[in-house]
Amino acid sequence: MSVFREYNTADSFVICADGGLDTALAAKIKPNLIIGDFDSVKAAPPAKVETVRLMKEKDDTDMLSAVKEGLHRGYRDFILFGALGGRFDHSYANVCVLQYINNMGGHGMIVGDNEKLFFMPGGRLHLRDMRGATASVYPFGVPNATVSYTGMKYPLTEDVMTSDVPIGTSNIIESDDATITVLGGNVIIYVLTGEKGK
């Protein structure tokens, strides 16, 4: 539950997707909205909390449904918790949700206890005060991407990464203001911090 210490959920609109309700209640976080087909949640939805029940047979995952509901209500900045580390298919689907958020004009990231994951269709990401962490970069949804690094153990200058050769794995951040710049294509950036990143 330490992942929530960095974020003030009191200033956020909290949407719990299915089993995410159990995690929120354990962390003493009050949801504003609960959505899902309720096939994995253990707790009953709290009284007076808006609940959207989905059919079990559906195209969208519960996470994507939650994001779509948030977008429909006007929200554009999303932090997804509990999106990695379980079943691979669901983890991959959640990475795809980051691209969906971007395509809808929003911004999103996946956050875990010692990890963060970003989707970038171009631009520059500053990795401030993360010296010693590892960063991995991969083309996503495209065959290749052109990337530059600064402040990393293995620098790159307009290097073309291809989706079939994962050369961007586990670079070490050596500067307090490292950057990853995407000059062409889409990438996912995975940053591992804390004990796991050593």
Image (cartoon, grey):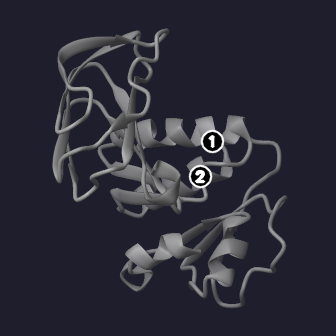
Q: Which residue is mark 2?
A: 83
How many numbered discs? 2
Q: Residue 135: image x %, image y %? A: 37, 39
Q: Is residue 120 left or right of residue 179?
A: right
Q: Is residue 120 left or right of residue 156?
A: right
- Above or below, 166 relative to 117: above
Q: Is residue 36 left or right of residue 5?
A: right
- Residue at (82, 61) in percent of width and height: 40
Q: Residue 80: image x %, image y %? A: 50, 57
- Above or below, 112 relative to 88: below
Q: Secondary structure at mark 1?
A: helix
Rendering quarter of residue 81:
bottom right
Rendering quarter of residue 22:
bottom right
Q: Which residue is mark 1?
A: 91
Front residue of 79 and 45: 79
Q: CA distance from mark 2 to mark 1?
A: 6 Å
Q: Residue 117: image x %, image y %? A: 43, 45
User: What amino acid is at disc 1?
Assistant: Ser
User: What amino acid is at disc 2?
Assistant: Ala
Quadrant location of the N terminus in the rendered image: bottom right
Looking at marks 2 and 1 on the same chain, the residue that comes earlier in the sequence is marked by 2
Front residue of 79 and 106: 79
Q: Is residue 62 visible?
A: yes
- Residue at (38, 51) in percent of width and height: 108
Q: Kindly indicate whether the residue at mark 1 contacts the one at mark 2 (C-beta within 8 angstroms).
A: yes
